[in-house]
Image (cartoon, rainbow, N blue to C red):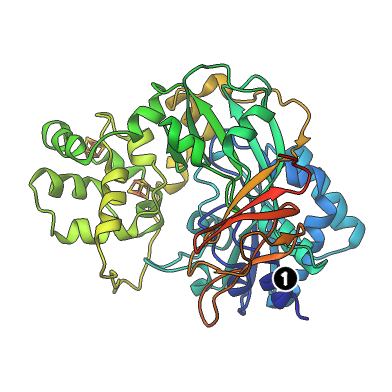
Amino acid sequence: MSLIDKIAAAGVVGAGGAGFPSHVKYNCEAEYLIINGAECEPLLRSDKFLMSHFPAEIVEGVKMVAESIGVDKTVFALKRKYENEYACLKRVVEDKGYNIEFFLMDSFYPAGDEHTMVLDITGRVVPEMGIPLEVGCVVTNIGTIYNSYRADQDKPVIDKYVSVLAEVNEPRIVKVPIGTPVRECINAAGGSTLNEFAVILGGPMMGDNLVEDEDIDNAVITKTDGSIIILPKDQFVIERNQQSMEHIKNKAKAACIQCTLCTEYCPRYLNGHGLEPHRIMRALAYEEVDSAEIFESAQLCCLCGICELYACPMALSPRLVNEYYIEKIDEKYESSKTEYEPHPMREYRKIPTDRQIARLDLSKYNHQELYNSVELEVNEVIIPLSQHIGAPAELAVSEGQKIKRGDLIGRAKENALSVNIHASISGTVKKADNTKVIIRSAEVVL
Ligand code: SF4
Ligand code: SF4
């Protein structure tokens, strides 16, 4: 079986983003393979953990994927300050004599944005509405490579290393079976220090905010979740994400001074794209909801959050406006732009991570001391059949069926962008439908 077939069989998806199926992403020809080890969202630690604990597996995975794609250059992109992780990976690369380069970056946000990384490493601008492959690059993240290595050993994606941070008694990395309830992860980190709290699944800039207890109760770890951040419900980031569109509109009308700072700091604008968030705010203020500004801006935006969580002096939210309209627009913007010129001030407008963390009022959680990592055993998992971009997997088990950890429970939909899903614990299928499979451990005696 080829590596691509093994990756497909194991159900590997992009571990740090929206979950694009890796067997499709890697099934191409490209000049560069770039391994994104920036982990650029503030506070996150899971990729660092993987790099320092599994450098041999990661380097071997990189070599396999690079050979499969047939690239000319393979580049690890890490932050310069990740000295330990760099040393761990470099030692393996040198011992093996592999032709893998290192690109060491300053610590800024969004260093891990694919477009930003491709431009920094190759000098090439990924076109508007485009992907890195259009300029000869495949960008993949550390967790995805680690899972690809394991796929080559015929091991499916069934566990996840998750950072559980901020308002918990014992911040740590927790290894959990996929489908583990978020509440159990928080308990594994000693529980929250707060009676009432909100959860960010992912990073504070782009992660999903869970504020209602019911939403936290229903949340489970999927193949793309690497971090749980516990914060007070009135914390700056949580409150900013709770605004209604009506409130955002009214604020845009009343307070947008058209200073253009949101545009001046926008990484896509700085890369040379035609995205100018101050224009979407102007269109919104004048109720021009069918305007070209809104149609284009929403689709060119990567939702990095810099405009609203860093740049805007009036606490306005161009990112949330873009996000709102992305869901409403069903026609794809066809960009006709062919020439791209990065902004001459681009280098000087990269936002230092520590300054970004201070702006988010998260400095007290920066560099939290981590307790020892733990491996969590759970009695029940709820495994969604859609944890990826594309069609959900098709149910491959029935209620009452006994299954073993690693068994196929959801089969990738044929002739569609889809991935396999596997059982993350052994036990009995308690419930199964077209959206999820609930497995109860064989160990549980009722
Ligand atoms: S930074 Fe804020 S005030 Fe300035 S143009 Fe953008 S949205 Fe308006
Ligand atoms: S979220 Fe704001 S800063 Fe980020 S790409 Fe979109 S418009 Fe630009």
Amino acid carrying label 1: it is: Ala
Q: Quadrant of ligand 1?
A: top left
Query: For this view, does 135 lie left or right of residue 439?
Result: left
> Residue 308 appears in which quarter of the rendering?
top left
Q: Is residue 394 visible?
A: yes
Q: Which residue is mark 1?
A: 66
> Residue 147 appears in which quarter of the rendering?
bottom right
Q: Return the residue nearer the eye: 100 or 253.
A: 253
Secondary structure beneath label 1: helix
Residue 81: x and y in percent read 68, 36
Q: Is residue 79 visible?
A: no
Determine the residue positioned at 50% across, 78% down: 416
Determine the residue positioned at 45% across, 30% down: 213
Quarter holding the C terminus is top right
Q: Residue furthest left?
A: 286
Q: Is residue 339 above or below residue 252?
A: below
Residue 169: x and y in percent read 65, 19
Query: For this view, does 27 lie left or right of residue 312?
Result: right
Quarter holding the N terminus is bottom right
Determine the residue positioned at 74% across, 46% down: 50
Q: Is residue 314 above or below residue 422?
A: above
